[in-house]
Image (spheres, helix red, strand yellow):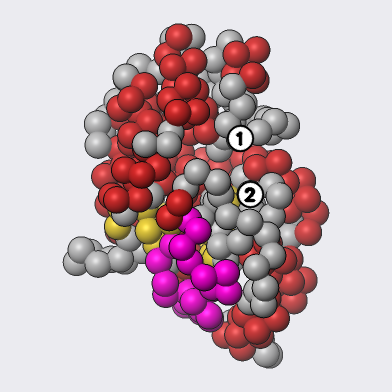
Amino acid sequence: MMTALDSPPLGLVLADIVHSHRPRSEAGSVPAGIPHLSSPPFDRFGIAVATTSGDVFSAGDADLPFSIQSISKVFTLAMALSADDPGRLWSRVLREPSGTSFNSLVQLEVEHGIPRNPFINSGALVVTDHLMERFPDAAGHVLQFLRVQAGQHSGQGPFIDEVAAGNELANSSRNLALAHFLKNFGNLHRSAEAVVENYVRQCSIMMSCVEMAKAGLFLARGGHGANGPVVSRSEAKRIGSIMLTCGMYDAAGEFAYRVGLPGKSGVGGGILVIVPGECAICVWSPRLDSKGNSLAGSAALADLSDRTGWSVF
């Protein structure tokens, strides 16, 4: 397995990854119904690696903020688990791959309002609702958590794009439908509107690859974050297992085959990957494949895994 001291140095490897994988054409697509996600140029590409020894390596557009979207679900899950008895949350949401669309209404109705996992939209709404029991402004609490973990304490760094959140909220009919389904089955304790608003705002957090890699590092360090424990070592392992099996929409199996690491993507084009005991990686490129994952980002992570030997297998 490669370390920062190996030859070639990791910084040079990342620079070559950027050179090899930065998009040269408008392949792939951007999400329909979320206008602000179509604004970054197609050739944006950044990658960052934060290691458990405290080093950060980056290349390309790694310092440009992007919309984290569903990557936020990793952090709300960790915060919900750390804030309460995990058994209470796991009685409301399962830990199985869905096999259907991330925003499926059909599966939720058939399974009586218990979402398959916390990374599909219905599951994330339950997690947000659970977090709101202790922190009514769940999105603001998530933002503060990310700022601390990323080492940003002065108002700089991660922020919520409130204009984008407002636009996305105006196009959230399907998420509202999911929330009302959950409410009808007794699996949502707050109003559907309040939960969806918090969910959309957390998805509208803007971060750079460097900030995201640093924020996710607690999962590579057995749950230990910037200022102490975030979750237990056992919970960090379990979050990683759900990322591996459920984190890449309907392409989790393909990603595990190609990359071999726990990952969570977002339709903003970012992917967070954890190498347990070693590092956290974030890659961003805005154009998506047919499953909603970054096209260039997925290819770059497969390449990086091959070059470094980083894998859980």
- Please name whichever residue, 70 or 51, is drawn nearer the observer in this view of the structure: 70
Compared to residue 43, the image places residue 6 above or below, namely below
- Please name whichever residue, 82 or 264, is drawn nearer the observer in this view of the structure: 264
Q: To which quarter of the image does residue 68 belong? A: bottom left
Looking at the figure, which quarter contains the N terminus? bottom right
* Residue 293 is at least partly visible in this image: yes
Q: Position of residue 116 (x, y in %)?
A: 62, 26
* Residue 227 is at least partly visible in this image: no
Question: What residue type is disc 1 on?
Answer: Phe
Query: What is the number of the mark on residue 102?
Result: 1
Tell me if 108 is positioned left or right of 71 in this view. right
Query: What is the number of the mark on residue 292?
Result: 2
Residue 301 among magenta residues: no
Question: What residue type is disc 2 on?
Answer: Gly
Q: Position of residue 249 (x, y in %)?
A: 65, 42
Compared to residue 3, the image places residue 42 above or below, namely above
Q: Whole-Å distance between the Cαs marked 2 and 1?
A: 10 Å
Residue at 20%, 63% in the rendered image: 155
In this picture, which residue range is highlighted in magenta?
Answer: 37-66
Report if the CB atoms under discs 2 and 1 are less than 8 Å apart: yes
Residue farthest to the left? 154
Residue 39 among magenta residues: yes
